[in-house]
Image (cartoon, rainbow, N blue to C red):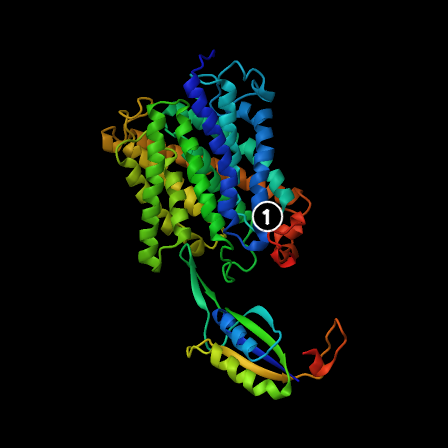
């Protein structure tokens, strides 16, 4: 499809793509501050490595699998190696930005989505295993799910499920995959008996700030234009983060007796996650309600791992999976075509249960596909990779920074 | 010669150092340490999960003194480091066979 380029739209999406790129280093710091000091570099490395590997894979093949062709389930090889991307928009998409920019913008989403999983597997995965897992996951899980939801020929897109910026594709997808990986990987040695408190919450708070900032590009840019929908998404993003920060703090103040910095950071991220599917589809104060609910629900959800005994180290499931589900379902209530005529009306706006049903189907489809494929991928890699997925007990005790990367994060004692 | 070792509250370090300097102590060694006594640790909460931290940060002071000065310096150290609350720490004294100043090779009291 030929494209008429609008310079204002192009300028905003160029900036947005850069903002989304910045979220991956932000996520690295958010997680890096929460691990023990002997594992901080390994955490940063898993995230930065995604910027390397997934970017290249995306340009070579994954973008094509996500956006080329008119298949229901997956794209084809028309855009492999960026062939024709300069002149042709993905089938069915009406773009006012260069198709190459659309590819680049989507690339940043593909980079950060598997990076979200690193929070669950912290402190115990071999770097070599992460390399293989990351590559296969981006191609086998991310690309197909992105096709279902974001490509106009995808089966969930066609049914009318809404996902403005990746509630299902990014957050539910990564969150449920995180559960599958930790089930194969097992718990950190000593968890939950030994204390493993965060080594630097200031790093975590800096990371949160970067994530929040970058999210304006993640959601605002998903309008793919510099227009009223982008402005709505921008405002919703901020309000949801703000309200969720408040929601989380209220819950922990009542439940545990203190308002904590980690709670404020976690709440903000939970709100950002929940508003992601809704950002360009809801108006008024819907974002405040969505944020408050997500913040409060996720503050409770992070204790699920203790009840069920899975070691989701930094709460990818409690924050991203649960927050993503909350946002995707609430969209079925709050969506409003007065905000965005490309959307649908939700239950509260008089649209009935239709949209809510489609949202639930999209959630379940993502949960099932991502969990099953990720689980099989992990079981296979654990079997075929020499050394499996997990580091030796010695290396885990020593710390991954030294054991895997021959570096240490902090060497003040040698100064 | 004796080695006076004190485990004290970190914020008392400056006062103790000044007091010992006033008494003519020429040098001491300070180490950041952790431990517990009657003062128990504390609890930290991260995302609702409580962690009990058993060890409390303290400062350890090691100072070598002449036999004649032991009582005065010990008394002064204890007075200065005391707040009267649990967790003030301990002081103990051990005999020292020999001391050598590395630069000059001086030994015994001359090396203090």
Quarter residue A12 falls in: top left
Quarter residue A80 falls in: top right
Q: If the image is split into quadrants, where does the C terminus of chain A sit? A: bottom right
Judge from the rendering whether residue A307 lies leftward or rightward of residue A135; answer left or right. Answer: left
The location of residue A356, given as percent across then percent down, is: 31, 33
Up-down relation of residue B83 to residue A260 (above or below): below
Residue depicted at 54% across the width and 48% down the height: A121
The location of residue A398, given as percent across then percent down, is: 63, 57
Judge from the rendering whether residue A367 lies leftward or rightward of residue B67; answer left or right. Answer: left
Up-down relation of residue A344 to residue A321 (above or below): above
Chain that bears disc 1: A
Secondary structure of the residue carrying tag 1 is helix
> Viewer-proximal residue, A288 or A395?
A288
Quarter residue B23 falls in: bottom right
Residue lying farthest to the left in this orientation: A350
Judge from the rendering whether residue A9 lies leftward or rightward of residue A185; answer left or right. Answer: left
Is residue A316 visible to the viewer in this orientation of the structure? no
Q: Please name the residue that numbered disc 1 is placed on.
A: A41
Judge from the rendering whether residue A141 lies leftward or rightward of residue A152; answer left or right. Answer: right
Residue lying farthest to the right in this orientation: B105
| Mark 1 crowd level (few <14, some 14–19, many ≥20, 10 Å Cα) | many
Residue depicted at 42% across the width and 79% down the height: B84
The location of residue B88, given as percent across then percent down, is: 47, 77
The location of residue B30, given as percent across then percent down, is: 59, 70
Residue depicted at 45% across the width and 46% down the height: A317
Is residue A399 visible to the viewer in this orientation of the structure? yes
Up-down relation of residue A354 to residue A299 (above or below): above
């Amino acid at each position: 499809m030929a494209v008429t380029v609008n310079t204002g739209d192009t300028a905003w999406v160029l900036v947005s793509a850069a903002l989304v790129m910045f979220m991956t280093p932000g996520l690295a710091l958010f997680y890096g501050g929460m691990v023990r000091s002997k594992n901080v570099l390994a955490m940063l490395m898993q995230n930065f490595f995604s910027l390397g590997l997934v970017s290249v894979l995306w340009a070579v093949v994954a973008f094509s699998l996500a956006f080329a062709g008119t298949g229901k389930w997956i794209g084809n090889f028309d855009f492999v190696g960026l062939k024709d991307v300069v002149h042709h928009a993905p089938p069915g998409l009406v773009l006012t930005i260069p198709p190459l920019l659309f590819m680049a913008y989507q690339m940043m989403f593909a980079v950060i989505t598997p990076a979200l999983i690193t929070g669950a597997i912290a402190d115990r995965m071999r770097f070599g295993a992460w390399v293989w897992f990351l590559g296969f996951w981006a191609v086998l899980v991310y690309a197909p799910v992105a096709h279902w939801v974001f490509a106009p020929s995808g089966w969930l897109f066609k049914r009318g499920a809404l996902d403005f910026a990746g509630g299902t594709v990014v957050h539910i997808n990564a969150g449920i995959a995180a559960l599958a990986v930790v089930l194969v990987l097992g718990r950190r040695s000593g968890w939950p008996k030994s204390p493993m408190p965060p080594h630097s919450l200031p790093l975590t708070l800096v990371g949160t700030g970067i994530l929040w900032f970058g999210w304006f590009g993640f959601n605002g840019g998903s309008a793919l234009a510099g227009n009223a929908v982008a402005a709505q998404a921008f405002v919703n993003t901020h309000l949801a983060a703000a309200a969720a920060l408040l929601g989380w703090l209220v819950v922990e103040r009542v439940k545990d007796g203190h308002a904590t910095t980690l709670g404020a950071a976690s709440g903000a991220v939970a709100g950002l996650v929940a508003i992601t599917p809704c950002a360009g589809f809801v108006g008024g104060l819907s974002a405040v309600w969505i944020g408050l609910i997500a913040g409060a629900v996720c503050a409770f959800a992070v204790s699920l791992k203790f009840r069920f005994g899975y070691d989701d180290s930094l709460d990818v499931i409690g924050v991203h999976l649960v927050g993503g589900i909350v946002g995707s379902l609430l969209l079925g209530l709050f969506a409003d075509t007065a905000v965005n005529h490309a959307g649908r009306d939700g239950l509260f706006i008089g649209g009935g249960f239709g949209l809510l049903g489609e949202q639930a189907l999209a959630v379940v489809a993502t949960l099932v596909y991502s969990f099953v494929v990720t689980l099989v991928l992990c079981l296979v890699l654990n079997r075929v990779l020499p050394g499996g997925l997990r580091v030796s007990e010695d290396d885990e005790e020593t710390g991954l920074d030294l054991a895997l990367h021959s570096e240490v994060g902090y060497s003040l004692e040698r100064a | 010669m004796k080695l006076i070792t004190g485990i004290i509250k970190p914020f008392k370090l400056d006062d103790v150092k000044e007091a010992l300097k006033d008494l003519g102590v020429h040098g001491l060694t300070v180490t950041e340490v952790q431990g517990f006594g009657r003062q128990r640790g504390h609890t930290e909460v991260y995302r609702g999960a409580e962690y009990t931290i058993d060890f409390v940060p303290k400062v350890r002071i090691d100072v070598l003194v002449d036999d004649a000065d032991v009582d005065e310096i010990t008394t002064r150290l204890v007075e200065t480091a005391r707040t009267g609350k649990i967790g003030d720490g301990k002081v103990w004294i051990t005999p020292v066979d020999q001391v050598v100043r590395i630069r000059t090779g001086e030994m015994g009291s001359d090396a203090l």
